[in-house]
Image (tube, helix red, strand yellow):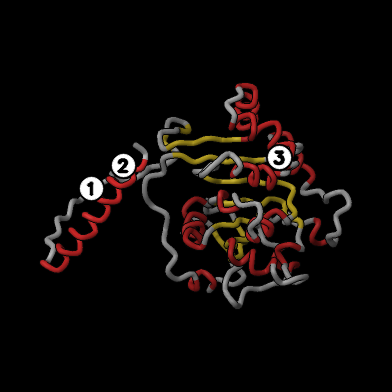
């Protein structure tokens, strides 16, 4: 493993059993962010500043920790990627906040360089009133992997994410809009982009005009996305090299011979659906 990754509870990695590593066709990915080059330079010079009116303690206000929230299915992949991409001369303290024995001490968590957790753990702790260490820290940066997981603004999971305090916010997703344009609002709300966090304002100036085909609304949406999004595809390159190298796709066709009983069931289901389709078409004639 490249680099020196210090985990105050290294055995936590072994507890993430059954987690699948991410492999496959990454057609498109984008990152939405509320940080800018100017603000990033300010952080490097002065460190993370406390929010005006914040109720966090002095120790927690000075936290320079990055919190990464992801689905359980990619948790182990994040751990592997740290080992793959961190240079050998970099000492990175990170903690996997997962499992029944996870340490809930905000002071310890705020001393890490990176804290990695899942949406389910965050939501579970959020439901325990006054006992959520992740919500008692003002993070330097919060990163949402598969950020479309918060697309439902009424879900407890979304509320848990939106209630986090941070100076920098990033959203990683390949599908920022899944069902409708309103999916995007929760992501903008997490990024704290005013006035878009006002749901009524968003609906009146962006969502409704775009839905009705208004060109002005579409231009506003395009301008917004252009200014907050870093878009990458599998053909994107940095310094002449692909940002992502995927193995060659292989297609295998496996022919299956059905037994007599299986074929009867198959034909029965096939006939049922064909009949249903004919009935549906006849209804609209």
Give the quadrant of residue 281. top left
| 135 left or right of 182 in image | right
Q: Which tag, 3 or 2, sits closer to the chain's start?
A: 3
Q: Which mark is residue 40?
A: 3
Q: Answer above or below: position of 234 versus 59.
A: above
Question: In the image as oriented, which residue stretches furthest toward the right?
Answer: 53
Q: Answer above or below: position of 148 versus 155.
A: above
Indicate the secondary structure of the residue bearing disc 2: helix
Q: What residue do we see at 58% from left, 69% from top?
A: 98
- The residue tagged 2 is 282
Indicate the secondary structure of the residue bearing disc 1: loop
Q: What residue do we see at 45% from left, 71% from top?
A: 17
Give the mark toward the camera: 3 or 2.
Answer: 2
Q: Which mark is residue 228?
A: none
**Badge 3 local density, few (<14 within 10 Å), some, or many (20+)?**
few
Q: What residue do we see at 44% from left, 33% from top?
A: 236
Q: Answer above or below: position of 100 versus 55.
A: below
Indicate the secondary structure of the residue bearing disc 3: helix
Nearest the camera: 269 or 187?
269
Q: Quick check: can you spot residue 169?
A: yes
| 60 left or right of 248 in image | right
Nearest the camera: 53 or 199?
199
Q: Quick check: can you spot residue 226?
A: no
Nearest the camera: 80 or 146?
146
Mark 3 near mark 2, Cβ–Cβ under 8 Å? no
Q: Which tag, 3 or 1, sits closer to the chain's start?
A: 3
- The residue tagged 1 is 251
Q: What residue do we see at 64% from left, 40% from top?
A: 33
Marks 3 and 1 sit apart, C-alpha to C-alpha, by 45 Å
């Amino acid at each position: 493993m490249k680099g020196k990754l210090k985990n105050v509870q290294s055995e936590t990695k072994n507890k993430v059993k059954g987690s699948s590593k991410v492999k496959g066709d990454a057609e498109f990915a984008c990152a939405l962010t509320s940080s800018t080059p100017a603000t990033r330079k300010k952080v490097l010079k002065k460190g993370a500043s406390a929010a005006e009116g914040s109720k966090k303690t002095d120790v927690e206000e000075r936290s320079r920790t990055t919190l990464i929230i992801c689905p359980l299915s990619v948790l182990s992949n994040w751990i592997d990627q740290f080992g793959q991409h961190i240079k050998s001369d970099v000492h990175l303290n990170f903690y996997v906040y997962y499992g029944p024995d996870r340490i809930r001490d905000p002071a310890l968590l705020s001393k890490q360089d990176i804290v990695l957790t899942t949406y389910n753990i965050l939501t579970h702790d959020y439901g325990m009133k006054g006992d959520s260490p992740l919500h008692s820290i003002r993070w330097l940066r919060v990163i949402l992997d598969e950020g479309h997981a918060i697309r439902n603004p009424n879900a407890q999971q979304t509320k848990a994410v939106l209630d986090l305090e941070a100076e920098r916010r990033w959203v990683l997703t390949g599908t920022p809009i899944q069902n409708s344009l309103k999916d995007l609002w929760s992501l903008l709300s997490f990024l704290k982009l005013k006035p878009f966090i006002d749901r009524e304002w968003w609906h009146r100036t962006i969502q409704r005009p775009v839905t009705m085909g208004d060109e002005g609304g579409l231009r506003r949406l395009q301008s917004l996305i252009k200014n907050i999004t870093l878009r990458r595809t599998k053909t994107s390159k940095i310094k002449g090299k692909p940002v992502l190298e995927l193995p060659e796709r292989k297609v295998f066709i496996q022919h299956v011979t059905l037994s007599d009983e299986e074929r009867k069931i198959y034909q029965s289901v096939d006939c049922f659906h064909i009949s249903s389709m004919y009935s549906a078409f006849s209804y609209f004639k």
